[in-house]
Image (cartoon, rainbow, N blue to C red):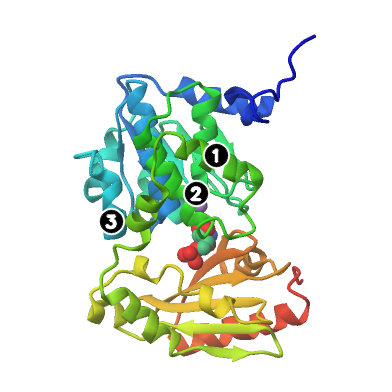
């Protein structure tokens, strides 16, 4: 009698743990075919890169290195100090300071964690005009515009890092511990440390395989979250002092005091997680964080609870993101932008948070 395939304590053989659809396998192979040793490859992500953008880049960089392909990171904004540890064993790989120069020499560009030129900030024009294939690996729901090239886009993935893992798996690329460190950072940060609704069984299977390379989960937590400048908890304190709650509407928001980042010697990245506090209040369905990003330009981070779709809310303002985590930015003074966005939010929640005409 044939042995049952669950004979090893219920574990599936490695190759069967993460079945990929034929269309995903085909898309992953098309990306591998576009990557030719000897090419100049640039990896890039959105302005103010986060753990998913940077972790996916570093993960892919290591996967490609093991395939004999050298790539560099060319982002529109500098790497926040929190994520410098990802580049410690990759001297010279983060070329974000000379991104335009590198992009002008690239044979292939890989855009990660976005699908829109608009989110590439000052690099958008260069990427648009280069005339080289642009690979896109992304998990956002918002449609975007990029030059042609192989696509691997799946909004059901928790993080772009999960998709980079799949592409590696489909092509049987060796998964090193260094690659796993980047991809684990990507998944841990985009799932709020495996708390958010995007944490699917599949996400944990990928995370498990990443840990199986020998990564220490506590080390990963310490590197990403427990290596903060003193100003980070002080910034949290100042921002949380501004909390306003409208319990009847299900709305709560906080505002970063003007000049707080500079005064406390921290960067915008240190705000990561602040919006979870207004979101955590019982009865809140939409939480917002307001911050001035430059003179007269306000950025709004949006988070939702339940079935409120904040990506749809952000779209008429030119923003986007995911159903439960999205963002937008608007010209105007803080007071004006808050009045307009909060009024729209009240109307939106009055209509149950479903897309309103
Ligand atoms: P965060 O609020 O943490 O900056 O971003 C949450 C999500 O919304 C991320 O997936 C991010 O890509 C998206 N997002 C944030 N700001 C913008 C924006 O100005 N435009 C678009 N399209 N997406 C944004
Ligand atoms: Mn992401």
Name the residue: 54% across, 90% down: 244
Residue drawn 27% across and 72% down? 266
Q: Position of residue 287 (x, y in %)?
A: 58, 77
| Label 3 secondary element | loop
Q: Which of 21 and 332 is in front in this view?
A: 21
Q: Mark 3 points at which residue?
A: 78
Q: Badge 3: few (under 14), some or many (20 or more) residues near its Cα, within 10 Å? A: some
Q: Which of marks 2 and 3 is in front?
A: 2
* Residue 148 seen by the camera: no
Q: In which quarter of the image is the C terminus?
A: bottom right
Query: Which residue is under mark 2?
Result: 187
Q: Quadrant of residue 237?
A: bottom left
Residue 313 placement, left or right of 291? right
Residue marked by disc 1: 206
Of the numbered discs 3 and 1, the one sitting upstream in the chain is: 3
Disc on res. 122: none
In this orientation, does residue 37 appear?
A: yes
Q: Whole-Å distance between the Cαs marked 3 and 1?
A: 28 Å
Q: Is mark 1 on a helix, strand or loop?
A: helix
**Towards the viewer: 223 or 139:** 223
Q: Which percent across, then down, holds residue 230? A: 26, 74
Q: Mark 2 vs mark 3: which is more N-terminal?
A: 3
Residue 88 lies, with reference to residue 83, above or below; the image says: above
* Quadrant of the rendered image containing residue 108: top left
- Indicate the secondary structure of the residue bearing disc 2: helix
């Amino acid at each position: 009698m044939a042995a049952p395939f669950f004979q090893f304590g219920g574990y599936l053989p490695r190759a069967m743990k993460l079945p990929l659809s034929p269309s995903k396998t085909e898309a992953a192979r098309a990306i591998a075919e576009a990557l030719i040793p000897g090419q100049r490859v640039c990896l890039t992500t959105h302005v103010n890169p986060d753990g998913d953008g940077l972790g996916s880049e570093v993960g892919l960089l290591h996967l490609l290195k093991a395939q004999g392909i050298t790539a560099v990171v060319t982002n529109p904004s500098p790497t926040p100090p929190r994520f410098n540890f990802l580049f410690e064993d990759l001297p010279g790989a983060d070329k974000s300071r000379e991104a335009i120069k590198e992009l002008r020499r690239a044979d292939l560009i890989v855009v990660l964690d976005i699908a829109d030129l608009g989110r590439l900030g000052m690099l958008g024009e260069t990427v648009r005009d280069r005339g080289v294939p642009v690979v896109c690996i992304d998990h956002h729901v918002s449609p975007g515009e990029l030059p042609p090239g192989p696509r691997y886009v799946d909004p059901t993935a928790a993080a772009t890092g999960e998709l980079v893992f799949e592409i590696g798996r489909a092509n049987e690329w060796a998964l090193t511990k260094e690659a796993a460190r980047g991809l684990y950072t990507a998944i841990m940060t985009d799932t709020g440390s495996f708390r958010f609704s995007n944490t699917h069984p599949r996400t944990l299977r990928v995370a498990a395989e990443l840990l199986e390379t020998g990564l220490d989960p506590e080390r990963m937590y310490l590197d990403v979250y427990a290596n903060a400048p003193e100003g980070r908890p002080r910034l949290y304190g100042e921002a949380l002092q501004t909390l306003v709650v409208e319990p009847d509407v299900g709305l709560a928001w906080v505002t970063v005091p003007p000049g707080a980042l500079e005064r406390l010697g921290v960067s915008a990245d240190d705000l990561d997680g602040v919006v979870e506090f207004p979101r955590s209040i019982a009865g809140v369905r939409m939480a917002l964080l307001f911050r001035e990003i430059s003179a007269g330009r306000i950025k709004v981070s949006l988070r939702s609870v339940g079935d409120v779709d904040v990506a749809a809310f952000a779209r008429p303002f030119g923003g986007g993101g995911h159903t439960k985590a999205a963002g937008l930015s608007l010209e105007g003074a803080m007071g004006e932008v808050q009045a307009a966005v909060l009024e729209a939010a009240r109307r939106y929640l009055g209509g149950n948070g479903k897309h309103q005409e």
